[in-house]
């Protein structure tokens, strides 16, 4: 099962990022992967949220790579993003 998780995560990102947005999708993927590796749930939640936020911020502001914001938030993230 562990061998299938990365390809499943990639396929999930491709299909879900258009609706959920890149940041939420990355956080969900990281949380699931950490839980599967038996990380404490609160540590997995905090780490996945912080890392997803950092990745989104670096890609969108420093590297100027547009990431999908998703239909869920109607294309509007808070002003900090």
Image (tube, rainbow, N blue to C red):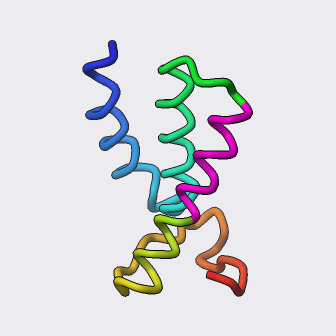
Q: In the rendered view, would you say 25 is above or below 12?
A: below
Q: In the rendered view, would you say 74 is above or below 61?
A: above
Q: Say which quadrant the N terminus sits in.
A: top left
Please name whichever residue, 14 or 46, is drawn nearer the observer in this view of the structure. 46
Q: Looking at the image, which residue is at 45% across and 57% down?
A: 17
* Residue 48 in magenta stretch: yes
Q: Say which quadrant the C terminus sits in.
A: bottom right
User: Which quarter of the picture shows residue 20?
Assistant: bottom right
User: Which quarter of the picture shows residue 45?
Assistant: top right
Residue 33: x and y, percent?
47, 30
Q: Looking at the image, which residue is at 49% across and 69% down?
A: 56
Residue 15: x and y, percent?
38, 49
Is 7 on the left or on the right of 57, as rendered? Answer: left
Is 39 on the left or on the right of 78, as rendered? Answer: left
Span of residues in magenta = 42-53
Q: Looking at the image, which residue is at 54% across and 61% down?
A: 23
Please name whichever residue, 79 or 45, is drawn nearer the observer in this view of the structure. 45
């Amino acid at each position: 099962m562990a061998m299938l998780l990365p390809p499943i995560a990639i396929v999930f990102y491709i299909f879900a990022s258009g609706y959920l947005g890149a940041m939420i999708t990355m956080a969900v993927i990281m949380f699931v992967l950490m839980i599967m590796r038996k990380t404490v749930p609160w540590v997995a939640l905090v780490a996945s949220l912080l890392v997803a936020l950092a990745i989104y911020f670096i890609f969108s502001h420093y590297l100027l790579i547009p990431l999908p914001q998703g239909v869920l938030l109607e294309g509007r993230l808070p002003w900090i993003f």
